[in-house]
Image: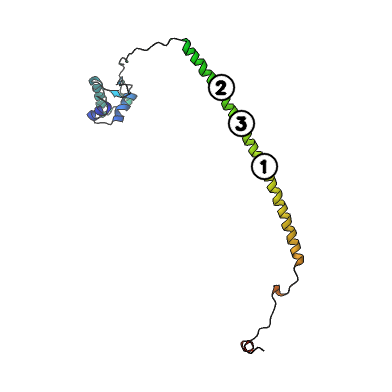
């Protein structure tokens, strides 16, 4: 049975079953995908744990099952040191060294390029600063010369005219 089937059987959630297995270090088998696979003996153990918890026993007080199941055994091919593997390892290390050297050269090239761009920007800033200073001096000179050229005007620059009344304007007096 899988975890969800056992959880339905016991009336608990699948995460509860997984938590019990992990906290109590229960010897449960797993399939090739890493999912738990429960046998009837495993289900009996889980039922016992469930009953103990229902009767008020804390999970820390439940004695873990010490019996470990035998792990799956398979054949593992022994890797013999072969000349081809050694050659491949040498090539890989040479490629890594070359890759690091290339990365270093690219980084240094980029730093030089950025330095040139920064220097160009600094030259533009100094040129603009000089132009702004020149414009400020010209504005100051224009303000000084404009005060001297204006004629003196009385009454805030307004000329007083004699007002004609309506009748005299009609007859042209």
| Residue 12 in which image quadrant | top left
Instruction: Residue 58: tell me if it is visible.
Output: no
Instruction: Residue 22: tell me if it is visible.
Output: yes
The colour scheme used here is rainbow
Residue 149, how many percent across, how many down? 76, 66
List the residue tagged with mark 3. 109
Q: Quadrant of the C terminus?
A: bottom right
Task: Give SS at disc 2.
Answer: helix
Depth order, front residue of 154/125: 125
Residue 166, how many percent across, how many down? 61, 87
Q: Residue lying at the far right in this picture: please name it.
A: 148
Give the residue displayed 26% in from the left and 21% down from the top. Answer: 42
Q: Earlier in the sequence, mark 3 or mark 2?
A: 2
List the residue tagged with mark 2. 98
Decide: is 134 above or below 74: below
Between circles 2 and 1, the one closer to the viewer is 2
Between circles 1 and 3, the one closer to the viewer is 3
Q: Earlier in the sequence, mark 2 or mark 1?
A: 2
Task: Give SS at disc 1.
Answer: helix
Give the residue displayed 71% in from the left and 51% down from the top. Answer: 133
| Residue 15 in which image quadrant | top left
Q: Residues within 10 Å of mark 3 (few under 14, many from 20)?
A: few
Q: Residues within 10 Å of mark 1 (few under 14, many from 20)?
A: few
List the residue tagged with mark 1. 122
- Is residue 143 found left or right of 35 in the rendered image? right
Residue 66, how many percent across, how many down? 31, 17
Between the residue at mark 2 and the residue at mark 1, the CA separation in whole angstroms equals 36 Å
Q: Residues within 10 Å of mark 2 (few under 14, many from 20)?
A: few
Between the residue at mark 1 and the residue at mark 3, the CA separation in whole angstroms equals 20 Å
Query: Are the two marked residues, 3 and 2, in contact with CB atoms closer than 8 angstroms?
Result: no
Q: Earlier in the sequence, mark 1 or mark 3?
A: 3
Give the residue displayed 49% in from the left and 15% down from the top. Answer: 88
């Amino acid at each position: 049975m899988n975890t969800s089937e056992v959880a339905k059987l016991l009336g608990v959630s699948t995460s509860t079953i997984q938590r019990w297995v992990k906290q109590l270090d229960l010897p449960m088998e797993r399939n090739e995908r890493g999912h738990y696979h429960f046998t009837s003996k495993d289900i009996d153990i889980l039922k016992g744990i469930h009953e103990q918890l229902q009767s008020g026993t804390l999970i820390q007080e439940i004695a873990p099952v010490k019996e470990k199941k035998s792990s799956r055994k398979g054949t593992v091919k022994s890797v013999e040191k072969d000349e081809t593997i050694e050659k491949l390892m040498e090539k890989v290390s040479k490629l890594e060294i070359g890759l690091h050297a290339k990365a270093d050269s690219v980084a240094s090239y980029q730093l030089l390029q950025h330095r040139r761009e920064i220097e160009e920007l600094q030259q533009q800033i100094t040129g603009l600063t000089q132009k702004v200073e020149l414009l400020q001096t010209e504005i100051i000179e224009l303000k000084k010369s404009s005060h001297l050229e204006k004629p003196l005007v009385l009454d805030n620059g307004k000329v007083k005219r004699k007002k004609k009344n309506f009748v005299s304007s009609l007859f042209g007096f």
